């Protein structure tokens, strides 16, 4: 078997890593800031408590590096939930199997109704989301959905259950551009606690998913941890370790990082470890200083105030007006959401906010029909 | 006599080519491009909406500006050829800036796929402008398959680092039979002037203008620098002396 990320990951110990991050000093931070190319040790210093007094300096650097690489632009995308059926138990999720909520999976006709609305708002990049119900919402369902909407979106991303290599190949053939697969937490034991049942309880299968994607030459892989489950610093270090491994191994693939923080939902879980706004700003800037090219994405989980200010600090793509329930845009507006969004402003208002921040709103930055040639 | 640059059937008085990415608004992009007096402007196909009214394209609708669609985003020769054909149909131009970068991090061009695609596109009747490494042998190979110019990079794209490949650019300029356009890495007007002094036929600048605090002013500065560098090249630079001249020449006894 070829090497996967797991072989590297298994050589690390969570507690030692966390202790090492927390032991970083002012000198380590200054050394990292003054260095041209930053490595994972520098990243540890930049996310450490010792870097807090340097937040403004980090933000200034992050902002200017991002502008050099991505220009004065922000990419817009819209999520669309296809189904809330799920056979996993996840302690933090509104779709968790044990939650007694009405389940719904969109039909072709309903999908077309939803995308008509999304298109009318100007979106050309779409993110399709499902729970994990392999019988009803398996790879065939997802392939069908992609086929159905392909002619209308320049760029299609999915956030669904981890799949097999051949299944990803099939989806790519049908027009899939990117896959987001968050590890939730890199803390093996905590992961078990939060995912006691269902296919998702297999930590290693999820951990090696980006490898399966890299092997089939996917255009983009999105990584992330769900902040609140465990210490955000250690989880972010392991995410960065994952990123660096993938970049070296699958060099033709692009990468993005997302920063979901636990939000209230039906059957709610209180965050075990808090992550403040200042922490999240520190983390976003640290990623940018580590890597000039990685895409950084912020969703509507975050507040209006936070989003107004973060768009100039290193973030490269955002969503707006998102609905986290299947059919939420048109078909069945009232159904139960996966989580409550925070920034509910309409797309037009977000575009206006970006423009007044001196940012061009980018709707289209891909062509999805080159590869079928 | 006017100093005209000819590529295929088009004549250019401006030797500053520009791009459309990274500006904070399409309004500002339009103003900056007009200020640059550029006559050839590259636009990423993946960014334009060819079926509807496109915001970028509508701002480029000026008689001075010729469109140069680029294939940014493709990873293979096959995809590049397909993209070029789409763009010919949609934008009604057979000009194409051939960019094949399988590596999304540094966006470095793949020489093997580029050569393959260039050969095919030339056969299909395209005016091919390939973005490549500053590789003198590759430039000659591309010339052989019939490209109309070569576009070697000065430094990694978007890096603003200047002419890091100077030694190889000089060889390319020395050997070429087609125009040489220095394409990536030019970060300041002095870099552009320097490229022109070395004998480049034109330069392509995008990031340095778009990301500047004042893109319109920067566009003007680049225009002046390119003109100045070209003028200096035509006027023939005084040679750089390698050694100081001895105060008592060794051969004075012959006089």
Image (tube, helix red, strand yellow):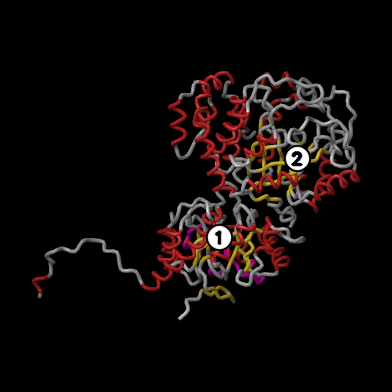
Magenta segment:
B120-144
Nearer the observer, B118 or B187: B187
Residue located 55% across and 57% down the image: B206
The secondary element bearing badge 1 is classed as strand
Is residue B125 one of those drawn in magenta? yes
Figure quadrant of the N terminus of chain A: top right
Picture coordinates of residue A219, whole percent (x, y): 67, 46
The secondary element bearing badge 2 is classed as loop
Nearer the observer, A369 or A74: A74
Question: Is B11 drawn above or below residue B136 in the view shown?
Answer: below
Give the foreground label among 1 and 2: 2
- Of the numbered discs in the image, which one, if any, rests on residue A345? 2
Residue under label 1, please give it. B131
Question: Is A305 drawn above or below residue A67 in the view shown?
Answer: above
Picture coordinates of residue B210, whole percent (x, y): 56, 55
Q: Check chain identity for marks 1 and 2: say if they share one.
A: no
């Amino acid at each position: 078997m070829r090497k996967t990320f797991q072989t590297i990951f298994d050589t690390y110990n969570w507690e030692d890593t966390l202790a090492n991050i927390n032991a970083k000093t002012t000198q380590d931070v200054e050394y990292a800031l003054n260095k041209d190319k930053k490595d994972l040790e520098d990243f540890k210093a930049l996310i450490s408590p010792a870097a807090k007094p340097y937040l403004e300096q980090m933000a200034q650097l992050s902002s200017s590096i991002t502008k050099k690489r991505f220009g004065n632009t922000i990419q817009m995308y819209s999520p669309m939930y296809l189904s809330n059926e799920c056979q996993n138990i996840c302690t933090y999720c509104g779709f968790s199997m044990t939650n007694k909520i009405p389940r719904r999976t969109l039909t072709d006709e309903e999908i077309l109704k939803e995308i008509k609305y999304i298109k009318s708002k100007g979106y050309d990049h779409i993110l399709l989301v499902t729970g994990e119900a392999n019988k009803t919402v398996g790879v065939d369902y997802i392939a069908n959905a992609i086929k159905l909407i392909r002619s209308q979106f320049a760029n299609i991303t999915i956030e669904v259950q981890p799949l097999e290599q051949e299944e990803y190949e099939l989806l790519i053939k049908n027009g899939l551009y990117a896959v987001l697969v968050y590890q939730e937490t890199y803390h093996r034991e905590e992961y078990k606690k939060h995912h006691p049942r269902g296919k998702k309880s297999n930590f290693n299968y999820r951990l090696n998913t980006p490898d399966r994607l890299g092997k089939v030459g996917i255009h983009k892989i999105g990584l992330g941890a769900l902040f609140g489950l465990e210490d955000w610093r250690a989880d972010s270090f392991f995410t960065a370790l994952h990123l660096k491994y993938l970049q070296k191994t699958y060099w033709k693939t692009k990468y993005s990082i997302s920063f979901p923080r636990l939000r209230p939902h039906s059957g709610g879980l209180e965050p075990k470890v808090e992550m403040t706004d200042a922490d999240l700003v520190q983390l976003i800037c640290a990623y940018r200083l580590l890597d000039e090219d990685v895409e950084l994405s912020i969703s509507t989980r975050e507040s209006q105030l936070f989003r107004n200010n973060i768009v100039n600090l290193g973030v490269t793509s955002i969503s707006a007006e998102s609905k986290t329930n299947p059919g939420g845009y048109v078909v069945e507006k009232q159904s139960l959401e996966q989580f409550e969004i925070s920034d509910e402003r309409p797309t037009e208002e977000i575009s206006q906010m970006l423009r007044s921040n001196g940012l061009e709103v980018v709707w289209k930055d891909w062509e999805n029909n080159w590869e079928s040639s | 006599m006017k100093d005209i640059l000819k590529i295929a059937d088009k004549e250019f008085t401006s030797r500053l080519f520009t791009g459309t990415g990274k500006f904070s608004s399409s309004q500002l992009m339009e103003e900056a491009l007009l200020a640059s007096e550029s006559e050839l402007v590259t636009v990423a196909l993946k960014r334009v909406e060819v079926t509807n009214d496109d915001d970028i394209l509508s701002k480029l609708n000026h008689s001075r500006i010729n469109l140069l669609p680029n294939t940014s985003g493709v990873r293979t020769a096959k995809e590049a050829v397909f993209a070029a054909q789409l763009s010919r149909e949609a934008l009604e131009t057979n000009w194409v800036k051939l960019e094949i970068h399988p590596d999304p991090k540094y966006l470095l061009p793949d020489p093997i796929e580029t050569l393959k695609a260039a050969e095919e596109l030339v056969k299909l009747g395209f005016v091919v402008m390939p973005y490549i490494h500053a590789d003198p042998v590759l430039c000659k190979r591309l010339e052989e398959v019939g490209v109309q110019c070569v576009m070697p990079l000065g430094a990694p794209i978007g890096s603003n680092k200047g002419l890091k490949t100077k030694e190889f650019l000089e060889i390319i300029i020395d050997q070429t039979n087609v125009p040489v356009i220095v394409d990536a890495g030019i970060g300041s007007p002095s870099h552009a002037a320097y490229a022109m002094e070395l004998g480049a036929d034109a330069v392509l600048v995008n990031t340095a203008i778009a990301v500047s605090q004042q893109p319109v002013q920067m566009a003007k500065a680049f225009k002046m620098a390119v003109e100045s560098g070209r003028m200096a090249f035509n006027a023939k630079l005084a040679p750089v002396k390698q050694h100081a001249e001895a105060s008592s020449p060794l051969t004075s006894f012959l006089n």
